[in-house]
Each structure stands twice: as structure tokens, then as C-alpha cells.
């Protein structure tokens, strides 16, 4: 009886050992999100777009600020010649104008930040969806993110698929027709007809 129990126990042990050998390896990888966003063409294009808008709108505002500075300098030289009443009135006008320019700078910064934030959120959502689809297609159980918002404390370099993701995202972006290019071409054709 003891022999039968020992044989059964050894059989169970042998079967359980064989089952652990059958465990399938879990395929994992990681993406360096900060590198991804620096090298992804659509992200670069989006950054360039808002940088150009900031520069253009900033030039307009800077011209207003330069005029204000010139008026303020003229005020200093004319204040003594025109008297105290004139100086108080003109000083109040300049102060109000300075305040309006400050508000305009803040509003411009907020507007650009809000517009770029909406587009950047959309881009990030698209990248997350792409990585999810990429993981399913390539048999990954997990794809971790590293970089600015790190969720991995350590990973071997051999599991880094950042370059693969960047290449496929850039290829997809290049293959996508640009929405901005079409209206500009139509505008030029419309102007040529006039």
C-alpha cells in the first residue's frame, strides 16, 4: 500500500513537472515613448505647425508691443512739455494699453496651447491604438512604455521595438493623403481662374 501511494505521488509529481515545461513563453517588448515622439514624422509636423503659428502670431503682437514701447518713450519726453493733466491722461491710456497687450499675450499662448493640445491628444490616441494593433498582429502579450511617462523600470535592449513602431507609423503617415494640401491646391486653382 505504501508503495502504491509513493508511485502515485511520483506519477503526479512527474506529470506536474511535465506541465510546467509546456508553459508558453510570454512575448513582451517596450517602446521608448520620448524617442517615438521625437522621431515620428506626424508629431514633428504638428510641432512645426504650431511653432510657425506661434511665430506668425507672435510677430503681429511684437509689432504692437514695439509701437507701445515707442509711444511710452515719446510720452516720457513730452510729459514735461504738455503739463501734468496731459501726462496723467496719457499715462492712464498707456497703462491700459500695456495691460491689454499683456492680456493679448496670455490669450495667444492659451489659444495655441489649447489648439495644439487637442491635436496632440488625438495623435497620442492614434499612436496608442497603432501600438495595440501592432502588438496583436505580432503576437505580443505586453508592450510597455518607457521615456517621459515611464511604466518600465528596466528592460533589456533586445525587447526595444521603438524603431519598428516609428518606421511603421512614419510609413503609414506618409501613405495617408494630407488634408491641408488639398484645400491649398484648390485655393490656388480658384485664384488662377479669377
Image (spheres, rainbow, N blue to C red):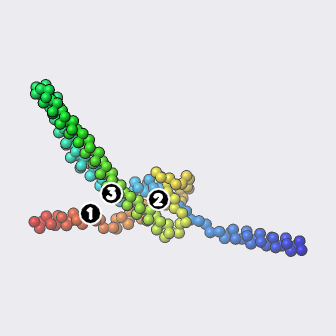
Sequence order check: which comes first, mark 2 or mark 1? 2
Q: Which residue in the protein does label 1 denote?
A: 180
Q: Which mark is residue 162?
A: 2
Vertical comparison of 108 with 16: above or below: above
Residue at horizontal 49 percent and vertical 57 percent from the top: 145
Q: Do the residues labelled 3 and 1 touch (CB within 8 Å)?
A: no
Vertical comparison of 185 with 83: above or below: below
* Residue 30 located left or right of residue 83: right
Residue 159 at x, y percent in the picture:
53, 59
Q: Which mark is residue 45?
A: 3
Which residue is nearer to you in this view: 96 or 33? 96
Element on which disc 2 rests: helix
* Residue 183 located left or right of residue 176: left
Disc tally is: 3
Residue at horizontal 29 percent and vertical 55 percent from the top: 49
* Residue 84 located left or right of residue 49: left
Amino acid at each position: 500500500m505504501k508503495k502504491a501511494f509513493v508511485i502515485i505521488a511520483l506519477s503526479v509529481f512527474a506529470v506536474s513537472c511535465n506541465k510546467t515545461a509546456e508553459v508558453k513563453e510570454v512575448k513582451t517588448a517596450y517602446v521608448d515613448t520620448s524617442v517615438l515622439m521625437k522621431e515620428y514624422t506626424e508629431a514633428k509636423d504638428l510641432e512645426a505647425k504650431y511653432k510657425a503659428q506661434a511665430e506668425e502670431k507672435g510677430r503681429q503682437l511684437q509689432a504692437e508691443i514695439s509701437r507701445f514701447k515707442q509711444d511710452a518713450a515719446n510720452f516720457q519726453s513730452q510729459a514735461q512739455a504738455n503739463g501734468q493733466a496731459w501726462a496723467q491722461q496719457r499715462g492712464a491710456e498707456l497703462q491700459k494699453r500695456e495691460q491689454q497687450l499683456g492680456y493679448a499675450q496670455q490669450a495667444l499662448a492659451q489659444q495655441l496651447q489649447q489648439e495644439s493640445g487637442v491635436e496632440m491628444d488625438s495623435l497620442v490616441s492614434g499612436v496608442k491604438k497603432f501600438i495595440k494593433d501592432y502588438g496583436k498582429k505580432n503576437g505580443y502579450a505586453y508592450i510597455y512604455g518607457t521615456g517621459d511617462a515611464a511604466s518600465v523600470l528596466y528592460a533589456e535592449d533586445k525587447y526595444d521595438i521603438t524603431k519598428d513602431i516609428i518606421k511603421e507609423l512614419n510609413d503609414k503617415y506618409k501613405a495617408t493623403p494630407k488634408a491641408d494640401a488639398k484645400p491649398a491646391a484648390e485655393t490656388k486653382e480658384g485664384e488662377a481662374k479669377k
